[in-house]
Image (spheres, grey):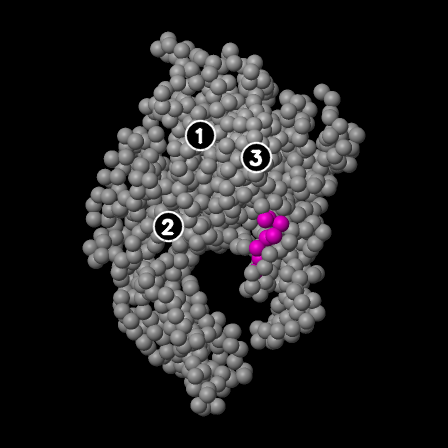
Amino acid sequence: MPVPTLRATTSLASLRRASPQSRPHAWSPLRRPIGRRRHFSTSPTLLAAAQDAKVDLKHVRNIGIIAHIDAGKTTTTERMLFYSGTTNRIGDVDEGSTVMDYLPEEKQRGITITSAAITLEWPPHPPHVTTKDILSKPIHTINLIDTPGHADFTFEVERSIRVLDGAVTILDGVAGVEAQTETVWRQADRYRIPRIIYVNKMDREGAVFGRVVKDIAARLNVWPAVVQIPVHNLAKSQAGSPDEVFGGVVDLVHMNVITWKRETEGRVMTLTKLEDAKERYPGVYEEAIKARTALVELLAETDEAILSKFVETEDQASITAKELKRALRNCTLDAKTRVVPVLLGASRVNMGVQPILDAVLDYLPDPKECGKDLIPITVRGERYALQVREDSKVCALVFKVMHDPRRGMLSYVRVYSGTLKQGDILFNTTLQKQERALKLLRMYANEATDIHSIRTGHIGVIVNYKNSRTGDTLILASSVTNAQSPGLSSHKQHKREKKFRKKHDKESGIPDPLTDATLQLRPIDVPPPVFFASLEPNTQADERGMEDALKIIEREDPSLHISNDEDSGQMVLSGMGELHLEISKNRLTNDLKAKCTMGHIRIGYREVVTGSTTIHEIYEREILGKKSYAGITATVEAIRDHEAFTDPLGMLAKSTISGNEVIINVNTAQELEDPTVKIPSYMDLENLLDNITNGAIAALSRGPMDYELHSTRVILTVDPSNFRSYHESSPSSFLVASRLAVEKAIQACGTGLMEPFMNVVISCEEGDVGNVVADITSGAGGGSVLALDDEGDTSDPSLSSSSPASSSTYNTTASSSADETAAVDPIDVSKVYAPPQSYRQRTADTQDFGEHTRTKLIKARVPLAKMMGYVKHLKSMTKGRGTFVMSMDRFERMSDVRVRNAMAAIRS
Ligand SMILES: Nc1nc2c(ncn2[C@@H]2O[C@H](COP(=O)(O)OP(=O)(O)OP(=O)(O)O)[C@@H](O)[C@H]2O)c(=O)[nH]1
């Protein structure tokens, strides 16, 4: 097949076409990908070399594949890799031969656990090109992340979405919008990521495209822009009567029927003009006209050009494919329109995948679109927007850190501005540390290739970066003008900073944020852990190994927390769910070779004070002739839901820590009356406040019942008249005084227990709803159902304040960023176009999608204790078909009976 001139002009194409012989340097041993390249048909080195060449940012897409568990994300991604020529055979989830799910645990369980990044190019090169249509586009680089669908790995989705520009949401053609789909949809809403939807598994019995389209409108509250409708072939059913089976799609933009050749594993697509397919697919022509008219009408609501042309001609055919695509792209990129293109297919039987890649190019944004050329940042605590520019200084976000046994620690970064070059010394503004990026990689799932730079808008990996963690911001160290100098006291540093600021602001007006050591890109939200289990080394000699391995997994996964139980001396691992802890334990023992045993998985209860007390503590010691003195007053009380924080005393510092509030008041009110009462000049105020806060945190970390405190307000007052000489009143003596004062106050107040309540969304079939609801609400510790699907509440309870505050409820820091998702009117589902189930046997009511079982969603608030082991329990209640997701709602005070039961369960 001749290469079209369009592509021959790009430097990418020329690199890609080059054979190993003609471009020997591209194959030099140094640049060969590390590890086995069993699956890859095109050398990752060549791809990387191509990417290092100047690719216009317009031709870059950073996208994620997001969905409920088992919707077919990995199955679809594997086809994308195959059709783009990245791999030479299709990986199969069921055989454990996928490129994307490469961890042994993923292969064994058939689920995605860690999101995998890969880069591909679309359209493909010969011989992978099969239709002229595909060739009409310039080559694009697609950086793709396949995310997990299990709710326990929601953080893995969160950190991927954080750095992506667009997403493909996959739905199951039978189940429709499932519980975790809603969760990932809201996550993408928070980061304002444009999406397209792909309805997969259309080959399954019971798959009804029209019903899923209605589901999208009702549950995701968006306007589905149907750009394809299914066509069916007749096949003999077991009963002998002809059945309609999924046979391909009508592309409503170009009015073609697309079918896929099975013998080529779907690589070869056949495009037939719709007029020519009338006989083969009766009724499809009429339906396609109807569907295209509905699409044009939907776009005309927001697109002036489409509207005026359509009003003039009253004919959908007058709108060209180009015009339709332009309008659809504009609508998809503009979140306010709530228009989402919907495609369909059956990835496992190799149908429908190439048009998704086309849609990624046509409808999803490049790194500079959708306002992404203005990245929100904070500099010295103030909000700014960073202009995305290739020619400016480097700024990147670490969004994932992973330990690779062969390569060491891999820090995945997204570069937001400038070019990150191999050998650059980068300044980590989060940790205030600098380090050289000695080696850069581009990842192809588990494979990798060396690269020299990561350009603006791209994703890459820094190898063996010792310090970075998820969420850290990196800028070029040589341009930083106000970094902390090690060894300089914070007081002196503060003075230096002030001087710098004065000078800088005077000279340039607005400071260049890329030179500022305090620049922070928006961090990644980490959900609080709710389950925990103890970990013990098998022998004393294994303790060190276990601790090292724990450090690695804690750095890899910020949704895992590791703490030390001082009394028992045991390490405690806390995480998002039972599966999360189980898999983390397997990673510790199987991959990181830690020799340890995990105890039973338990619930992270919290304590709360039941009264309010004020204690004045004087700490006075003399150790080895050295005096230490501090005086502090601590008031401890519970925080109720309805209370808002007020600051009548003009208090100096307030922090919210794990659901508690620590307020510090340095009582300098007396200063006015008595000039001798003031903070001594030797005392570094920031250091003093840090020490007092740390003392309070230590006291709050364990209450009299051995659990961490929650919903507790601590007000600490320091009276400068209590300060003694430089040697006696050091900040560290205030740490001890603060800890003792808070501990005593908590003891004096008395405490009760709080338990985590979860927002739970259960997907199950209609017939199982009664059983599931009865089970959830049964017993003393039962939950309450907030909404059943048909009751019209389609919002995610975790994002709404659906639970009324009662006197026994307390605040939590676990609330999600609901404020960022503005409330919008519900879509009128009756106005949404959806094709009928069959074009041959039209029912009078085109909205009647037959008797197929439909997935129902049950939304409930349930104590976490009831959700222990719920995966198995739900499966047994629903014949394996039910799934659920849950997110933390809040901690609630437990009744005495429930405390007794919980303690008895723990003891047993
Ligand atoms: N019938 C049918 N089955 C499919 C299709 N696509 C995927 N499957 C099957 O669905 C199951 C789940 O597929 P995956 O690709 O692992 O789904 P996933 O969304 O990546 O799953 P997680 O990453 O674990 O959330 C596998 O058994 C696939 O073979 C399809 O088009 N038709």
Q: Which residues are magenta?
A: 371-378
Q: Earlier in the sequence, mark 1 or mark 2?
A: 2
Q: Which residue is mark 3?
A: 308
- For residue 306: magenta? no
Q: Secondary structure at mark 1?
A: loop
Q: Earlier in the sequence, mark 3 or mark 1?
A: 3
Q: Which residue is mark 2?
A: 800
- Residue at image position (75%, 30%) is 8
Q: What's under tag 2, amino acid-wise?
A: Ser
Q: What's under tag 1, amino acid-wise?
A: Tyr
One can see residue 746 in this view: yes
Q: Which residue is mark 1?
A: 833
- Residue at image position (71%, 45%) is 452
Frontmost residue, 432 versus 903: 432
- Residue at image position (75%, 36%) is 11
Frontmost residue, 424 versus 563: 424
Image-quadrant location for residue 501: bottom right
Image-quadrant location for residue 137: top right
